Amino acid sequence: MRARVFVTLKPSVFDPQGTTVSDALHTLGYANVKDVRQGKYFELDIDAPTAAEARKVAAEAADKLLANPVIESYRIEVEETR
Amino acid sequence: MKFAVVVFPGSNCDHDAYYAAKHVLGQDAEFVWHKDASLGGADVIILPGGFAHGDYLRTGAIARFSPVMRDVKKFAEAGGPVLGICNGFQVLLEAGLLPGAMLRNRSVKFQCEHVYVSVEQTDTPFTAACRPGQILRIPIAHGEGNYYAEPDVVDRLEKNRQIVFRYVTASGAVEPGANPNGSASNIAGLCSERRNVVGLMPHPERACELAVGSADGLVLFESVLKTVTQGAFLGAEASAKAAVTAR
């Protein structure tokens, strides 16, 4: 199973890097890009019998290590692989 | 009195802290490798600055799983004095020994300069020899020192008097202009509820002799010496030492 974990800063948390990227895009002429939020992306190759089990493992990994709950939240997608 | 300076792979202010404790303050000091399970009977623990584990994932995120952190936690929970400087502060936050988290500096730049901080609380083991409101000129050197906590957590820190250091102007005013990184409420350093664990982003250990531009940081080391030798801090060091040696 492959779990994709997307970690982003919570909406209430200021993102200095995202703001800088947004400014750079505006310099390139993309005035229609209203906001940029930068985050982290993880691919976890998990040996698990079911998608639900893989999701559980990925969620534990995110809670314990991949995300800091004080400032970040996460979203998980699971895909079956062979 | 004995200091333990924890060394993580990537620590780079460990020798500065050791030098301040051993050669400026004239006390016993020992390096403790992060994989060591023993703190060597130290009275005080310092988590130094640097880039533990390369700052991979987040600053301090991997360091908090180092074997030595189990004893650091036990020592802290038993009331022993623990000081986290810069990256050491970030490790304390990730380990949950202090509340909140660090964000990238508002400037998105690595800020390396001397700043002014005010001592807001003198009833911690690392500020016991300070005057209330004393202004220290000490250096910062960090990319992620933008302290963040939910507003209700910051309110609680204010109410519990856990904000120990704030970025200020040379005359002591708490202003946005004196804030080098965007930290909430100009927070430069905190203590735990029990007050024995202190973390700060500025580097007092790099400001212990006039030859390096400032000796204002020495008072933190003098404070903990005073606290431990006078048994002024609830005699907690003794029970903290016992907590990590009895196993």
Image: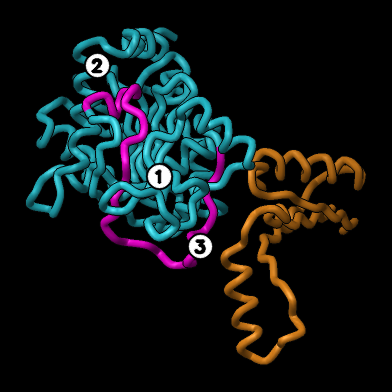
Chain colours: A orange, B cyan
Please give the chain letter of the residue carrying mark 1.
B
Label 3: which secondary element = loop
User: Which residue, given by chain and number where applicable, does mark 1 sit on?
Assistant: B188
Q: Is residue A66 visible?
A: no
Q: Is residue B118 magenta?
A: yes
- Identified at 49% across, 46% down, the residue is B185
Residue A50 can be seen, yes or no: yes
Give the residue type that dot 3 points to.
Arg
Q: Residue at x 49, y 51 (%)?
A: B183
Q: Residues within 10 Å of mark 3 (few under 14, many from 20)?
A: many
Q: Nearer the viewer, mark 3 or mark 2?
A: 3
Q: In the rendered image, which residue does mark 2 sit on?
A: B228
Vertical placement of residue B102 versus B127, above or below: below
Disc 3 and disc 2: Cα gap in Å? 38 Å
Estimate the x, y position of residue A35 in percent, counting from the top left. Answer: 72, 72
Question: What kind of element bears circle 2?
Answer: helix
Helix, strand or loop for disc 1: strand
**Which residue, given by chain and number where applicable, does mark 3 sit on?**
B106
- State the separation of the CA atoms marked 3 and 1: 14 Å
Give the amino acid at mark 1.
Answer: Ala
Tag 2: amino acid: Val
Question: Would you say B182 lies left or right of A52 here?
Answer: left
User: As drawn, is B232 to the left or to the right of A17?
Assistant: left
- The earlier-in-sequence mark between 1 and 2 is 1
> Is B38 colored magenta in this rendering?
no
Q: Is residue B182 left or right of residue A26?
A: left
Q: Which residues are magenta?
A: B100-129
Which residue is pictured at 25% across the width and 10% down the height? B231
